[in-house]
Amino acid sequence: MVYSARALALLLASSVAVVTSLFLSLVESVNRDALLVAAAISFSASYLLIFVVLEFLVFREVNKIHKIMEKLRKKELSNIAKQKSGALNPFQKINEEIHNFATLKQKEIDELKKLEAFRKEFIADVSHELKTPIFAAQGFVHTLLDGAVNDKNVRTKFLKKAAKSLDGLDILVQDLLTLSQIETGDIKMKFEHIDLFKLCAEVVEQLEEKAEKKDIKLHLLADRNKVHVFADWQRISQVVTNLVSNAINYTPDGGEVTITFEVSKKHVTTFVSDTGEGIPSQHLTRIFERFYRVDKSRSREKGGTGLGLAIVKHILEGHNSKAEVQSEVAKGSVFSFKLPRSRNDAADSDEA
Ligand code: ADP
């Protein structure tokens, strides 16, 4: 564009110089030298003038394009940090704008590709998880239909097994729904001042029978009988239930599961510890992923959906918190999470 502006300026300036010389040659008193000087001056002046005017027009148009691109970027990518160009040259500005735009679009494409891969993997995992209990129940029902139904003992046994598989399927679907509702934001956290000690006592009561079946002692220890935090009762109850339930599942018969609290000025940390099998360190960062299990077949045997800790993670994220885990193989694990201490808590503890 610069070159074409220069060429045009040269052409027009030459024409002006020729016309000026022709015009002056008609005047008798003007000699040859004066003609040459006049031609040179008119050529230089008109070249400069025309070139500046053309450049100005080009700059104006380029600036218009630049503004349009900037508007486009602001509209489409308002949530992404903008890199303001400090350049004065509009060509450089446009270049930078195009570069920024392309970089941002590439980021979007990469993000979408990642989501697509994640979606495919998730569908494959869910299909696999659903297939297991459905196939089991289907097998028992077909065996009954093929004649086992006539044997009273076998009939009851197979019906119980089919029912267990279907119960597992129901829990899996419920967990999947919970997870998807938390992720899409359909479940809003209902924050209030709640007594965490009371909440844990209720969870212990509900899981006592499950622990007794394995001869596991369930303790709830606190040096105060009220621990107030600001949280969603129902969701935190689910977090504690999932952690205690896991602790029971992964602790051998005769072991112990204990809930304790650590109260600081602003926070309350809840610890769920067990004397169970523990988790090898290389798995610790992955156990909060959906369907991630340390020992796939054994965890399934124990009745888990593989979603318990993913749900814990999402609920705690909704509370601006996260679950921590410390574990030692063959010794046990400690899961913990921190919640903001309720303003009322100090007054309550004074009463207690
Ligand atoms: P699951 O339904 O399989 O228990 P979770 O998401 O609750 O799924 O847990 C993921 C995995 O983390 C489990 O399969 C298990 O391998 C491991 N895990 C969780 N809690 C414990 C624990 N207290 N002790 C040992 N391993 C645990």
Image: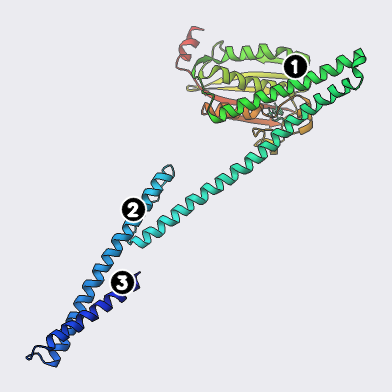
Label 1: which residue?
A: 216
Instruction: Report which quarter residue 261 is drawn in.
Output: top right
Mark 1–mark 3 CB contact (< 8 Å):
no
Q: CA distance from mark 1 to mark 3?
A: 89 Å
Residue 159 place in picture, x, y as percent: 83, 17
Q: CA distance from mark 1 to mark 2?
A: 70 Å
Residue 167 place in picture, x, y as percent: 74, 20
Query: In the drawing, what numbered circle is on residue 67?
Result: 2
Query: In the drawing, what numbered circle is on residue 5?
Result: 3
- Residue located 46% across and 14% down the image: 344
Residue type at tag 3: Ala
From the viewer's side, name the closer residue of 348 and 190.
Answer: 190
Q: Earlier in the sequence, mark 1 or mark 3?
A: 3
Residue 189 place in picture, x, y as percent: 51, 22
Does the rendering let one see residue 244?
Answer: yes
Q: Nearer the viewer, mark 1 or mark 3?
A: 3
